[in-house]
Every structure is written in C-alpha cells, then in structure tokens.
Amino acid sequence: MEIKNKAPRINLFSLRTVQMRTFHLTWLAFFLCFFGWFGIAPLMPLVRDDLGLTKGEIGNTIIASVAITVLVRLLIGPLCDKIGPRKTYTALLVIGSLPVMLIGLADSYETFLLARLAIGSIGASFVITQYHTSTMFAPNVVGTANATTAGWGNLGGGVTQMVMPLILAMVLGFGVSETMGWRLAMVFPGVIMLVVAALYWFFTTDAPDGNYADMRKSGALSPEDDHAGATKGMLAAAKDYRVWALFLVYGACFGVELTINNIAAIYFFDRFELSLQTAGLIAGLFGLMNIFARTLGGVFSDKFAAKGGLSGRVKFLFLALFIEGVALVAFSMMDALVIAVSMMVVFSLFVQMSEGATFGIVPFVNRKALGSVAGIVGAGGNAGAVAAGFLFKSEALTYQQGLMYLGIAVIVCSFAALAVRFSEKTVAEEKERFEKAMKERDALPSGAQAVPAE
C-alpha cells in the first residue's frame, strides 16, 4: 500500500518523530525475540546431559525451533496489512514470552521438543520489523533502515550466546543445581519481552500518519491502496516468481545464520574441547557481526541503487551471497581454532550483508502486497534453516561435513538472485521515487529526518 510522509533520512539519535521511535523499538523488539528464540542454544550441553538427548534428538529440536516460523511468517505478513504492525508485534511479544519462560518445565525429550517448537513462533518478529520500517522510510534509505533494524535485532542471536551462560552462572551462584539453573535462566528473556511489548504499544503507530484503523476511518488510507483482506495481496505475491527466487536466496543466508546460531556453541565445545563459557563467547562473535554487517548490506544496496537502479541492488545481492558460500566452505575446512574463528567472522560478514541486500529489494517487488511479499521471503529463511537442520541431525555426517555441504548449497542458490528482474515501468517509477526522496532529504534542515508525525 502507498504510505505518505516516509522519512528520507535516518537520524539515529532522535526519538522526536514516530519514524525514529519505530526504528529503535522494532530492532529492540526483534533483538529480544532473537535472544529468547536462541537463549537455550548455549545451554544445550547442560540440557543434553539433563534430558539425555542424542545427537538426532538435538537435531530434531533445532529443526523444530525454526520449522514453525515458516508457517507463522507466512501468516504474519498479511496480518500486518490487515490490523497493522503495532497490534501484531505487541501480540506476538506477549504470546511468545510464555513458552520462553515455560521451557524450564520440560522434563523429557518430547516436552522439550514441543517447547522449542512453540518458541520458534517469535521468529516471525522479523517480518513485522521489516514491514514496519518499510512503512516509515523512503526509497533512498529503506534498504539501510531495513538492514540496520534487522541486523541489530539479529544481534540478539549473538548476544544470547555470551549472556545466557553468564545469567546461568549468576543463577548457580545462589546455590541451585545446574539442572534447575538452565530452567530458571530462561525466565529472564521472557520477562523483558513483556516490558518491550508495552513500549511498542504506547510509542509506535502503524504508519507515519497514524494507525491503519484510524486512517481507514478518516479516508487517509484509500481503498485502492488498502489490502486489509490480505487475500488479494497474498495471491499476487504467491504468483510472482521473483518472490520465490528471493525465498530461496533468503533461505541461503538467513537460514544459514539460524543454523549456525543453533550449532555454533556445541560445535566449538565438542570439536575444540572448550569450556561452555568460551564456546559461547566464540559462537557469539558470529551474531555480533550484526552490529554493522547487515547494515552494510543495506547501505551497499542503496548505493548500488543510486548508480544502477533496481538491477544494481540485484547484482550486489548475488555477489554477497556467492562470497558467503565460498567463505562457509572454507570455514568448514579449518582445523586450527584461531583460523576457524577468523574464517567464521569473514563468513558471518557476508551472511549478514546478503540478508540486508535481500530486504533492500523486497520493498520494491510489490508495494501493494508488502506484507505478503515480506512474509513469504522471510519464511524462506526458516525453510532454509529447516533444510539445513537435516544435515546436522544425521549421525552419518560430522558437523564439519554438514557445513561444507551447506556452503556448496549457498553457492548454487546465489544464482537465483539473478532471476529477480523488474519491468521498465517499475524501474522508471522507482527511479523517480528515489530521486524525489533524495531531493526531500537534501531540503531538510540538518538534524531533521522527516515531516514530524506525532
């Protein structure tokens, strides 16, 4: 749908406008969802011993943690079109906090599997984050806005690798056993999710001019631009081959990130015989690259668009994804710890740049079905993680072999990016929007970022 008064500039240190309040609350909400989603991953060595899990059962829980998100992401995009991202995000944070806090009640493989399956629903928060920033920011900066909010949100997957072992240590300091400690530690992320749900409800709106319900009543959201029913938008998105090409591409970058978040700590713990805390710190480096790496993907996407239009965005996506695959293959071959960590950092850089570049393209595929496009492409990330999960479930494959095969698959999938093409009419329209946004940005006083919307 067409939204007015989008911000043509990002001013990180301002909370004066609803655009920037939304910017900061979307990444914070996604950060905490990621933190809760993968909070159990660095504690898996303890969970494995406590519940007596086999490698195959651990693989099943990894698949479960990302499988349900495929379905929820497909549903959440159209829901954003229908009731707005503000209500959708608030509800997801509240509902999602429950299994995060209650996973400690698991006392068997089956109950633990169900808990991880339920927690996986909060991974759909990504779609809302990308949807909401796409409604708030103009074409000249939307790639950067989407990449930065998603990247800083993904950072939760790295921070949780480092922080959850520390929270566990704090809990153990009160004299509880390790068996009880990992259970109590998971209450922490769930409680914080509830706090952010309240902030999201009170300090954001669906669009710069207000909430969808009010805009529909006032006529600010015209019927021809409104896909509240979502069916038309979902059908249009599902029929577009470019959406499915991006679905595959996102599976090869975000799906890989989810997989590494799940296995990194236990991989370094077992392969290099490290302590739980050290393995968690090293695994956390992978996610910490999100501080800037995904943003770089969005920035370069916007830069390539300035020179080459929409085709420039596509070419950069292909390049980043291809290099990601090569780096992953190289990482799988490393036997020395220092070299393995260094290669993991390089690999992580291009994983997250590829993610940022993917959602530098998504807002332009179908403006009137943004929620559906974002939902399908976002679901691709989790579908990729589910597929990759089978590589690390098999008893016949080592983790090293699984990583190598995954890298080869990424290289193959990178060519799908080149299938994303745009009509001459769309290219011309988006070029005009881009140039208009640039002029609006240049006309703004220093420090301003958009028409104030309170």
Image (tube, rainbow, N blue to C red):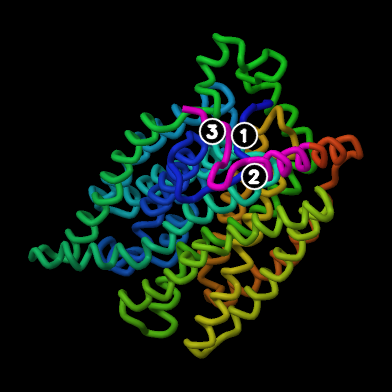
Q: Position of residue 428 (x, y in %)?
A: 87, 38
Sequence-wise, which precedes: disc 3 or disc 1? 1
Quadrant location of the N terminus? top right
Quarter of the figure with residue 6: top right
Q: Give the residue type that dot 2 points to.
A: Val
Asked whether the residues under the numbered discs 1 and 2 touch, taking CB atoms below 8 Å apart as contact, a structural biologist would say yes
Residue ID at (59%, 47%)? 146
Mark 3 is on which residue type? Ile
| Nearest-to-viewer mark from 3 and 1 | 1
Q: Residue at the left extreme?
A: 175
How many tags in the picture?
3
**Is residue 427 among what the camera can see?**
yes
Residue 82 lies within the magenta run: no
Residue on which the image places disc 2: 142
User: Spatial distance from mark 1 to mark 2, Cα to Cα?
Assistant: 9 Å
Q: Dot 3, how many residues are within 10 Å of its Cα: few (below 14), some (14-19), or many (20+)?
A: many
Residue 447 in magenta stretch? yes
Q: Residue at x 52, y 41 (%)?
A: 129
Magenta residues span 433-454
- Secondary structure under badge 2? helix
Give the structural element (helix, strand or loop) at label 1: loop
Front-most of 370 and 259? Answer: 370
Query: Mark 1, residues whose alpha carbon is within 10 Å: few (<14), some, or many (≥20)?
Result: many
Q: Residue at the location (67% across, 14% down)?
A: 222
Which residue matches tag 3? Answer: 76
* Disc 1 residue type (three-letter): Lys
* Vertical comparison of 287 with 124: above or below: below
Q: Which residue is mark 1?
A: 6
N-terminal of the pair, mark 1 or mark 2, is: 1
Q: Earlier in the sequence, mark 3 or mark 2?
A: 3
